[in-house]
Amino acid sequence: VVAVQPAARRAPRSAQRTRLWGALLALPTAWMVTFFVSSMVIVVLLSFGRTTNDGFPVFATSTANYRALWNEVYLELLLRSLLYALATVVISVLIAYPVAYAIALHGGRYKNALIAAIVVPFFASYLIRMYAWKALLSDDGLVNSGLRGSGLSDGVTFLNTPGAVVGGLVYGFVVFMILPIYASLEQIDKRLIEAGRDLYSSSRTAFRKITLPISMPGVIAGTLLTFIPAVGDYVNATFLGGPNQAMIGNVIQSQYLVTKDYPIAAALSFVMMAVIVVLVLIYIKFAGSESLMGEDRAL
Amino acid sequence: MAALLLDYDVNTAKASELEEMKKLLISQKEYLRAYSSDDINNMVGGDAWVHHMWSGDFLYLQQGVADDPTVLDFEAPREGTPINSDTYAIPTNAKHPGTAMVFIDYLLRPENAIKNMNYLYYPFPVKDALPAFADLAKDVPACNVEISDLENEDVFRLLGADEIQRRAAMWTEVKAS
């Protein structure tokens, strides 16, 4: 039972309040339209464009770029990217939930220090951290030197494997899973759990019936926050992947920056975004938009 | 390199030739750890023992990074070596083209070209600076580039957008498959 609070009590809004909200929203809206929507529009328009013979992208009304993408190679890339992102989400939940749970419910006065300890490493540039991973996991890197030194193993080939790419993605994005789960667990009224225990539930049942449902909005938000960037990531596959781990982001990146064929890169970006949007919509429908809204209600 | 192995022009963009190159590059994937251009890091980290790399990267690796330079060597394949040149260029819309010209002149003075070569490990086409490069590459003759090498047919040319696109599409398929 998740009756945290009675359904929202809506006070009728005065015209003055509506105007205030409108004024407050004006700046972010202007910002998003200028920098976000407009660049999206350019990407979509350019995806129907072509590249002139001297290498400049021009707008047009051709569907040639999309037809060029109708190729099993791109399908395979997209599927591989989705699979890696899915693995990233699953592993991230498995790591993030216990961490967030321990900090939120048993962190005591160290809560903030522990959260800072998780967040601070992420202040370093993503690229630098991935380079560090590459150096750590190299055949002659720190991890392998340690393994050889301790006699545990003759060395493990970490780099250029799917495991390294997914591992890098998890490392890169796990914080986006920990924080929302922490935020939802932190709000739990501990008296609910105590009440459950008073009614003779085992701690496992109390977790399953009280803690888990209340923290689901955090898990769902974390899933979206890790899945979406993981699908489009190219840094991990570049540094940690091998000949068979290219992701869709690698192709988009090289079409934009190496080949400089903006129209086809735009078409590829648009297809990827469309696929992600569809998947996210399906996910939200099944995960229940209500539990997403639940966070608002608990406030 | 695939073009040279198959005896094609290194700048080829012919569909039939690209198809053969694609097959060759995909067929050797099972023997490779990666297609990577992060050559120096891969060699230093011990992840690659044999690497496809530019001559200047090799000289930098050997003389500027490696603990033991004697264990490394550079071989130019007998099928040929692609040659590429970076250039100093002044954009047509540059605000101070004259100043840029003066700066390029400064960079091309032999004493400054030598400093740059000792940092970049690539030869500069400056007559009085070339002996210094020959000295830098004295243990690795394959890295020594003569001006006559630039007349070689394996020099990368500037290709048209459609040619680049066809070559890139082939490479994408190689990487993705």
Image (cartoon, coloured by chain):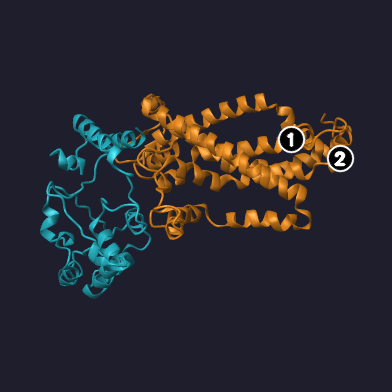
- What is the x, y in percent for residue B54? 25, 55
Image hue for chain A: orange
Circle 2 residue: A194
Left or right of A293: which side holds A279? left
- What is the x, y in percent for residue A82? 50, 32
Task: From the viewer's side, name the closer residue of A242 and A156.
Answer: A156
Which subunit holds the residue at mark 1? A
Which subunit holds the residue at mark 2? A
Where disc 2 sits, the SS reads: helix
Q: Quadrant of the C terminus of chain A?
A: top right
Chain letter, cyan? B
Looking at the image, which residue sits at the far bottom?
Answer: B111
Task: From the viewer's side, name the closer residue of A25 and A187.
Answer: A187
How many tags in the picture? 2
What separation in Å lies between label 1 and label 2 (alpha carbons)?
A: 15 Å
The residue sitting at 31% across, 65% down in the picture is B66
The residue sitting at 20% across, 69% down in the picture is B136
Residue A212 — which label? 1
* Sequence-first disc among 1 and 2: 2
> Is residue A151 placed above or below A282 in the rendered structure?
below
Task: From the viewer's side, name the closer residue of A91 and A116.
Answer: A91
Q: Quadrant of the N terminus of chain A?
A: top right
Left or right of A5: which side holds A88? left
